[in-house]
Amino acid sequence: MRSEPVQSTPELPPGTRIQPADCETHGAYEQKVFAVLGRELRSNCPECSRIAREKSEAAEQANKAMELRMALARKLGDALIPKRFLTRTLDNYRVEHDQQRKALKFCRHYVATFEQIREVGRCMVLIGKPGTGKTHLGAAMANELLHKTSRSAVYRTVGAVLQDIRGTYDRHSERTEGDILASLINPDLLVLDEIGVSKEQPSDFELTTLFAIINGRYEREAPTVIISNLEANDLGRAMGDRCVDRLREGGLIVVPFEWESQRGKEGF
């Protein structure tokens, strides 16, 4: 007659014993009693311990979620994207013909391969007729990076930048010109809109400011997206040939927007 194998009980550490105990909520359980430095320590009800552990883990997850929301809020605040463009995405860019489809494809690829783009500081120019969706796509690329990656992005118009810098010349200003420039040079992506919006020759102040921004990002190998209603040949006049040369480094991507204005239509 074969005997059944005897299942061994794990040995308790020296000085430890098990005794019956009762929980007011969950009833009877086996309580471990540990002898530590001449004192006895008793284990709690395992069900109570499990519930307490789950509550602690839930609170920790809630804190992490709050920290992530706060970090995203800071990113969005630093991004300076105007309210009108906060909801612009690559998915809600309305495509009606092949030229728009091609422009959208370039922007999607730029975001999808941004880690490689960032390594070489490859820049992009969205250029062409007004009202064709350039700002939508520029803001959309910034929004995609802000919401779906750990990368930082900033959207600014040239006019707003110049106004901010002039504001630092007030002796009561809490920011310096260096602060403004750093906020544009340091982000992983800068989308700089309304290049050459005025048909007049840009001032020395404007050209100097643009060069400080573009050159600062060039030295960091940080990619920049330029948006302009000008023709490609006029960019040098609007922002200076030195800026254009630095944008070309690493293989400039030029996306033309040559169709008629779509402004006022949904999705633009």
Image (cartoon, rainbow, N blue to C red):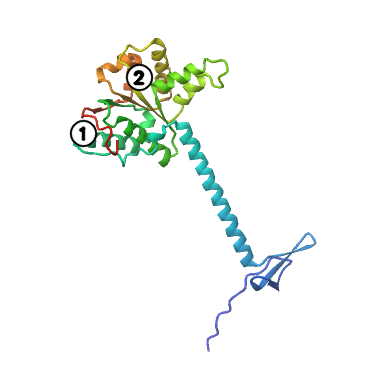
Amino acid type of disc 1? Gln
Report if the CB atoms under discs 2 and 1 are less than 8 Å apart: no
**What residue is shown at x 24% (from left), y 28% (from top)?**
257
**Split into 4 quadrants, where in the image is the C terminus?**
top left
- Quarter of the image for residue 263 reads top left
For badge 2, the amino acid type reads Arg
Q: Which residue sits at x=55%, y=85%?
A: 3
Up the image or down, 5 lies above or below 235; here it is: below
Vertical placement of 125 versus 46: above or below? above
Q: Nearer the viewer, mark 2 or mark 1?
A: 1
Could you tell whether 203 is left or right of 22 in the image? left
Counting from the top left corner in percent of width and height, residue 103 is at 25, 33
Tell me the tag on residue 246: 2
**Who comes first in sequence, dot 2 or dot 1?**
1
**Residue 174 lies in quadrant:** top right
Which residue carries the number 1 mark?
A: 99
